[in-house]
Amino acid sequence: MLGISDEEFLRGDVPMTKREVRIVTIANAQLAEDAVVYDIGAGTGSLTIEAAAQVPHGHVYAIERKDEAVKLIRANLAHFGVEERVTVLAKEAPDGIEKLPPCDAVLIGGSGSHLADIIDAVTKKLHDGGRIVLNCITLQTIAEALTYFRAHAKTYDYEVVQLQVNRLRQLGPYDMAKAENPIYIVTAKKK
């Protein structure tokens, strides 16, 4: 099942990728049932769990540097019953990537200002035809991603989509749009 309701996740004060963004991200990753996936900057584990649901014969590696988030990821894995298909690494990427098995897809939700180093590290692990799907909330991150993929055009084909979600909320007798943060979703396919 793709598109778990945001309210089903345990949250705390850790940022979470919203449902509509998760759906587009997972769709762009094009995961096979036996895919190996890295989720870097995993936050609450919402993308990890959506990916794990899509790879019943595969495995997801969730990499997260913040202790509170690592606890939430583990709690959410238990809540959704997908612990057996996920390994959590409490590290700051790119540390630990070199020890992971080769992968088919990489989801990047947070980079801790190490985006180029992270992409360099996962490029060594990503199968040909594999995909990196990067969610960028800041202009600096999208600028860094575009600079990187333009400089590595011999290695990656990429596209960028900007996604803006609005939710209606009732305000007296009226319905008013409440905007979520716009997100740039970069999908890069390794040649």
Image (spheres, rainbow, N blue to C red):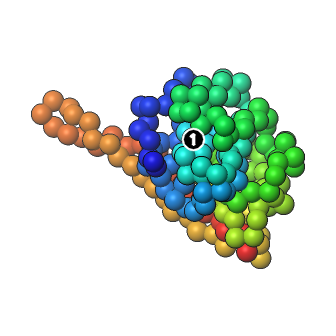
* Image x and y of residue 143, in percent: 65, 58
Nearer to the camera, 41 or 47: 47
| Residue type indicated by callout 1 | Ile
Compared with residue 161, is residue 165 higher up or lower down, i.e. above or below?
above
Task: Report which residue position mark 1 lands on.
Answer: 49
> In the rendered image, is residue 121 in sight?
yes
Nearer to the camera, 92 or 88: 88
Secondary structure beneath label 1: helix
Residue drawn at (61%, 60%) of the image: 32
- Res 144 quadrant in image: bottom right
* Image x and y of residue 162, in percent: 49, 59
Q: Is residue 80 left or right of residue 94?
A: left
Compared with residue 46, is residue 108 higher up or lower down, i.e. above or below?
below
Quarter holding the C terminus is bottom right
Nearer to the camera, 27 or 43: 27
Residue drawn at (87%, 49%) of the image: 98
* Image x and y of residue 166, in percent: 35, 46
Nearer to the camera, 151 or 128: 128
Residue drawn at (67%, 68%) of the image: 189
Q: Crowding near pointer 1: few (<14 within 10 Å), some, many (20+)?
A: many
